[in-house]
Amino acid sequence: MNTHISLDSCAFKVSSNYDERKKPRDRYIEYQQDLYKIANATFDESTLLKGGQYSYTELANDLLNDLDRKALGQDVDLMVVSYWTPEFDPDYSALGPYLHNTLGLQCKSFDVCDCGSVCTLTALSVIRDYMLADESINETLLVGLEQNTIPLPNPEHAPVPLESGCGIVKIRKDDSGPVLLKHIEIINEHQVAQNDFNPQIYLQNLLKNQAVGIDEVALWVRKDSYFYRALCHHMHKNPSMLDKLEINFLRCNYSSMNVFRWLADQVNYPSAKPHALLIEEDLESLEFGSVLFNFDHTNYDHTQ
């Protein structure tokens, strides 16, 4: 059985805010009020007039209108939808069945949600395991969404995305795609909170286990993350081979879409290093996901 997982294509789009504010339907407002009553909290209805006011179907269609829907849905054996933020005033009860109809899919599908802003890497990890365990699944479609009209309490204290958008990645069970997935894992908050957790040692062991040299990889991480601050502390305290590590920074914003944005750039404009290690930290906990990609395998043409 083929044990290679590669990313065939990636598209990402930020949707512009509407010029005029839309009044949410009464059914949606009532639903949010009921949720807050259960939590014994006060719901601030004015928060429903902020942000992009997008449903997930609108965000998906905004990106799909730029793509070849027939080609995108062709030969797909599994579709996974991931999201961090709740949907705004939806027309449909679930996005998955809507995309099945829109793309003409006949495959299995499920959602990955309620796992914080690391939902994209969590979904990618689940997809990797799912594809390797099931011989009938050779192509998977990962659809990620995020909208920034969030029903909040009064007073409001919560991380809210600056933008609304959609990302789509097509994943294959072979090594023909431009990006090869070498390693992915989710490290939970309990593991990070242990006194002996050291991000410097974590990175050294990861690269050693994957047989990747320090000069062959570029690290991508948020500069405002706990992981990066702890890494700097340990590197200053105990200099090591990681001092030669190339470090690049992801956008420091509230978003679960950094992975899609980064992948879209990398697929179209590959890194000069043969490997890239991305660390994405959850915005509401210390949990993080790490994923190692390889851009320098036999079927990849760097002249594309």
Image: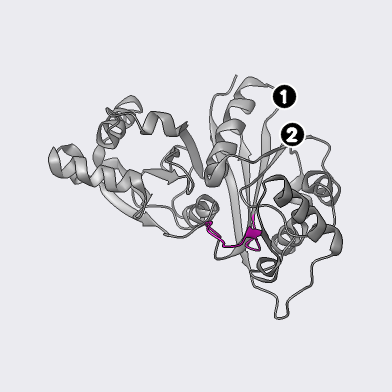
Query: Residue beneath label 2, please?
Result: 77
Q: Residues within 10 Å of mark 2 (few under 14, many from 20)?
A: some
Task: Give the main secondary structure, helix, strand or loop, of the magenta stretch.
Answer: loop
Residue type at mark 2 is: Asp
In the image, the segment drawn in magenta is: 146-160
Residue 230, percent from left and from top: 27, 43
**Separation of residues labelled 2 and 1 (CA atoms):** 8 Å
Vertical side of 120 occupied by 260: above or below = below
Please tell me whether mark 1 sits on a helix, a strand or a loop: loop
Residue sticking out furthest to the front: 40
Location of residue 148 by image quarter? bottom right
Residue 90, percent from left and from top: 80, 57
**Res. 136 mark:** 1
Q: Residue at x 41, y 44 (%)?
A: 278
Location of residue 87 by image quarter? bottom right
Magenta-colored stretch includes residue 191: no
Which quadrant is the N terminus positioned in? top right
Residue 116, percent from left and from top: 55, 44
